[in-house]
Image (cartoon, rainbow, N blue to C red):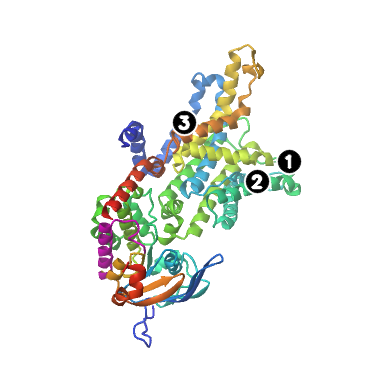
Amino acid sequence: MTASPTSGGVRPLLRIHDIHTYYGHIHALQGISLDVYAGEIVTLLGANGAGKTTTLRTISGLIHPSAGKIEFDGADVTHVDAHMLVRHGLGHAPEGRRIFGRMTVRENLQMGAYTRHAGAELDADFERVYELFPRLRERRSQAGGTLSGGEQQMLAIGRALMTQPKVLLLDEPSMGLSPILVEQIFGVIESINKQGTTILLVEQNALMALGVAQRGYVLQTGRIVQSGPAQDLLNDPEVQKAYLGG
Amino acid sequence: MTDTRRQSPSGLRAVTGRIGSIAGHHQSLTILVGLALVGALLPLISAVPPFSGFGTQKDWVGGFADAGVFVLLAVGLNVVVGFAGLLDLGYAAFFAIGAYTYAYGASTFTGLQTPFWIMLVAGAVVAAVFGITLGAPTLRLRGDYLAIVTLGFGEIVPVVALNADTYTRGTNGIVGLAQPNAYGLFGITSFPITNPWPWYITVLGIIAIAFMILYRLEDSRLGRAWVAIREDELAAASMGINTISTKLLAFAIGASTSGLGGVFYAAKLGVVDPTQFHFDVSFTVLAMVVLGGMGNIWGVAVGAFVIFEIQHQGLKQLGAFIQSLNVPVFQVPVLGSVDLGGINFLKFQFLLYGLALVAMMLLRPEGLFPSRQRRHELHEVAEESEEAAEDTSEAVKGA
């Protein structure tokens, strides 16, 4: 990993440059560029259908862009498949949680550690997830499908953490959760970040997301229409009108 | 809530759970002891009325050896359907490929006389190669679409065998397949056609090896990857699982088990022809897997054995039994004269499968001996929806 600083200072850990992604004939992403620097929480905001999930899936290698470039940790990963990117440190908690409903909580976390070998480090990571989400420890022998929505979201994040990500992609962690649970989840997201994991957070809940993020991008029908420090976006009249009900 | 429903069959489940946990700790030994026990006890059935009346011990043992072939097919298909969740309706194709591989390797047709034991390995390998060949173009398909493509492949193989008569002798089939050779072990050289015991013991041995390998695979990283793919392919990829190679391995391993069955079957029968591998075989094996309990190796094996015996002994005996009652021919309006004694129940086997499958789906959809996860899937739906309801009410309260 060549961490050579570029002219503008530190090189981003994750750099997306002008990517275009199609679903058949539908031009879902029309030239998206964004940077995520080590240690940051960056949020990607946008309405339904703006292309947030497509962006994350393109980054994580579940789908490949037809044009553009994705760099992760100094390497070109534009055409690297998802399962290889996980090994390189790109964790993804996909939209809709997608936990393994018939496996227990513990087995779900074990699936997260699929690419890793048993050992003290792995045990420490189980412990870390259980510390972050005590509910998961209580329910570790319970089938994932029987958890509540909030617990499933915790499990989805915990499972992604078990892959030991350098960058964690979170796709709408607040979806379908009560406000109290959303507060809780966002609190944990901040703790995970403080423990050293860089986070790219896709959200519809702009107020919460901008509350924890340092920077943000606003996505509209496949294009980035605005970007900047989270505080500026919070105060931006356009953003307020569109996403904050102001 | 579901407590009453859960507790009623708990006695049986506790017992199976107990056995399961013991088996989990000493797997290979348990398999060997279990199969040796089953293998030693089964032939005694010929001394137990009314089964003693159905045939001699040799008849029974010969039948069990044939049932063993279907046990192999069922545990192999279980890898594809039960573990990896890929619905394969053309599984008989790999059975055919195993059988024809033996016909090419050890018959007067090609003049080759490769030993049976080597051909077992060869049949498994060739079937695995075809498994990957079929698997590769279907990787992007799921569910119904995958089923249709595999169904097509299952039909292509016997049709090719039927029409490529220069290479397969078409409808006549390839005859003169060599008998396995025991090289003087227990005083047996070439397996005799009249004595079913060497066949029976051989198939038990093959099943034991297949069981040991499959149980190890189920517990391995690969086994867990199969389950993850069955549950959610996208999430599996997000865990770092290579979904392509994992699915291809399921096809390959499932096919190779079927190839073993094909080699044994061809050697025992001494002839292969295309009619032996039609869709009814694929369907029968799938029914065995579903009725036995998808995902559970022992369950599937028992399902295969029971269905095979019903098909080959049960229906025949039912006909004989009804005939022995001497029910007079009676008249029914519309139907005309009905002669119960003249019913050939073998002709109704697919009707009976159909009824059995419908009954199972209604009463015990997870099969007779379900795997733990299938049980979860089919019996905790009620709880899940309840949780979901709780969740939404929570959300409503919050809002």
Q: Residue at x 68, y 48 (%)?
A: B112
Q: Are marks 3 and 1 in contact (CB under 8 Å)?
A: no
Question: In the picture provided, is A177 more to the left or to the right than B150?
Answer: left
The stretch in magenta equals: A171-194
- Mark 1 residue element: helix
Mark 2 and mark 3 on one chain: yes
Q: Quadrant of residue A136?
A: bottom left
- Mark 2 residue element: helix
Q: Which residue is mark 2?
A: B155
Give the amino acid type for the residue marked by disc 2 in the picture.
Answer: Glu
Q: Residue at x 68, y 42 (%)?
A: B274
Q: Are marks 2 and 1 in contact (CB under 8 Å)?
A: no
Q: Residue at x 35, y 35 (%)?
A: B13
Q: Position of residue A211 (x, y in %)?
A: 27, 69
Q: Position of residue B197 (x, y in %)?
A: 55, 32
Q: Quadrant of residue A11?
A: bottom left
Q: What is the distance, in whole Å, between disc 3 and disc 1 at their CAs?
A: 38 Å
Give the amino acid type for the residue marked by disc 3 in the picture.
Answer: Ala
Could you tell which of marks 2 and 1 lies nearer the N-terminus? Answer: 2
| Type of secondary structure dominating the magenta stretch | helix
Question: Could you tell me if residue A219 is visible in this image?
Answer: yes
Question: In the picture provided, is B246 more to the left or to the right than A123?
Answer: right
- Which is more toward the observer, B264 or A213? A213
Q: What is the distance, in whole Å, between disc 2 and disc 1 at their CAs?
A: 15 Å
Mark 3 and mark 1 on one chain: yes
Question: Could you tell me if residue B69 is visible in this image?
Answer: no
- Mark 3 residue element: helix
For disc 2, the neighbor class at 10 Å (few under 14, some 14 to 19, many from 20) is some
Q: Which mark is residue B171?
A: 1
* Chain of residue at mark 1: B
Question: In the picture provided, is B59 more to the left or to the right than A169?
Answer: right
Q: Which residue is mark 3?
A: B40
